[in-house]
Structures are given as structure tokens and as C-alpha cells.
Image: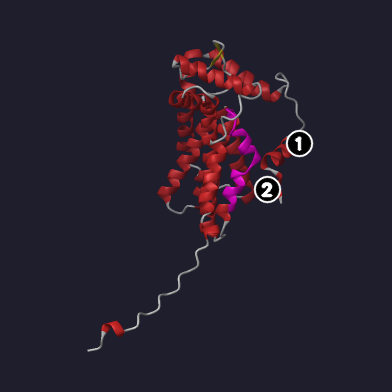
Amino acid sequence: MENLSSLETPAAAPKSAFRPSIALWPGLLLAAVVLLYLGTIGALPLLGKDEPHYVEVAREMWTRGDWVTPTLGGSTWFEKPALLYWLVMASFGAFGVSEWAARLGPALCELATVGLVSWVARRVERESGAHGLALWSTGAAASSVGLIAFSHGATFDIVLTAAVTLALSCFFVAELEKAPQKRRWLLAGLWAGVGLSLLGKGLVGIILPGGVIALYLALRRDWRGIGRLQILWGLPLALAVAALWYGPVIARHGQAFINEFFVQHHFARYLSNKYRHPQPVYYYLPIMALFAGLPHFW
């Protein structure tokens, strides 16, 4: 019988070379983003004239335990809806009153925005085989000057950005999805995002996603896409989400709220110069370039 010890052990199959510089990129990017958005939000005091106002409104609501009526100096403050105030109030309840706690909600909204961009890019990468699209898209979103700057302030623009991104991300992935049940859930996410947008900054929360979707369908000449939106149950869902605040505040304050919030701070603000914000037609073009950051145009 042949001695087993004399048998040669087959050579092990060569292992594929491990490239840590590639394998570690997603983890390093995630750690850098979290540190950038959460680690430095308390480094500066409240800035400008708006951020202190918004944080004080949330502090007064939190002190009273009132989730309905925004006040500033004890007087009603119906300039903006309540979603930002709710985020700040929840953070104050969990971590106490501080600049860091006031900005935690907006910073989490920006992390959610980056995560949604990454989710959509991964789905497109899977459908098209465009290798690296998810990583580069996530990096571009996370390093956007606008997202970095606004995540370090308790402002409504960040909350609106996250809500609109949720709505449009769900819409786009629903356009790619073939399974009917998954598509219905994605459309529910679209309409829930619209409802959160209404809570985030008022009527612009339905104009922005609605305008983008309408332009998308028009460019594709796909008017049947309107039927795919399931408006008959989707719009009531969005209104139900928005009614979490609009219902109680209208019930409590009635015409006074409607006049100040809708008439003055929506129509008068956008259709007149009552609030002294005149800007040229091309105003947002250089602003978008600045907020994206010049490296994104290389």
C-alpha cells in the first residue's frame, strides 16, 4: 500500500490579488461622509438671521410641548411649515438644546439625500452594467458644496431637498421596475415624498417634483406615463401625509393661518416684491453651479 505521506499535496489555486485601495473605497467614503455631515455640525454658532429664528421657533414649541403652532417670541409664526421644527424638537428632546442638536435633523436629511442618490445609481448600474456609476454618483452627491453647506444649518431647504429626492428617486426606480407589487410600493414612496415636501416647505413641495416628472414625460413623449403615476390613490396619500400638520393647524387657527401662510408667504412672496427678494431670471444658474462645486464640472 502506498505511503500516504509520500503523496504530493496539489498546489493550491492562486488567490486573486486583494486590492485594498479598491475594496475599501465604499467604506472609506461612508466614514468620510458621516464624519463630514455629523462630526462638524456643532462647530459654529447659529448663522445669519434665519437660522436663529427657525431654531428659536422650534425651541419654543419644544418647551411648550406644542407640535402644532409655531411661535417666535410668543407670537404665531406661520412663515414656514412644521417638518424642520419637528426634527429640531425631536433632537432637543433626545440630546438637549445645542447648536449640534439643532442641526442634527438637517444633517440626517442630507445623509438621506446622498443615500437615495446612491440607491438610484446602484439600480441604474445594475440595469445598464455601467460599472462604478454608484460609487462616483455617491461621491459627487456627498461632495456637493450645496449639500455640505446646507447640512450645517437648520434650514428648510435641506428638509425639502431630502423629501423631493425621495419622491423623484421612487418615481425613477418605479419606471425601471417590472414587478407590479414592488412598483406600487415605489409609487407610494413617491407620493409620501410629495407629502413630506409639502410639510417641508409648502406648496413648492408639489410644484418641484410635479414639474420634474412632467418635463421627463414630455421629453420622452410618454403621456401614458401620467396613468402610471396612480394619481387617484397617490394624491390622497400625499395629502394625508401633509394633513398631519396642516389639518390641526387650520383647525386651531383657521383663516389667520390661511391668510398668512398661503396668501402672504406663498402668492405674495412669489408674485410681488413685498418681501424684497428681487432676482434676475437667470439667478439660479450660477447658484446651481456654485452649489454643485466646480470640481463636478471637470
Query: Is residue 257 shown to the viewer in this render?
Result: yes
**Is 222 or 245 nearer to us in this picture?**
245
Image quadrant holding the N terminus, namely bottom left
Q: Picture coordinates of residue 55 (x, y %)?
A: 56, 21
Q: Picture coordinates of residue 151 (x, y %)?
A: 58, 34
Instruction: Find disc 2 in the rendering and name its residue.
Output: 296
Total number of numbered discs in the rendering: 2
Instruction: Find disc 1 in the rendering and name its residue.
Output: 282
Camera-near label (2 vs 1) is 2
Our reading of the magenta stretch's main secondary structure is: helix
Q: Secondary structure under badge 1?
A: loop
Earlier in the chain: of badge 2 and badge 1, it is 1
- Disc 2 residue type? His
Start-end of magenta stretch = 136-156
Confirm whether the magenta stretch covers residue 118: no
Q: Picture coordinates of residue 126 (x, y %)?
A: 51, 58
Rendering colour mode: secondary structure
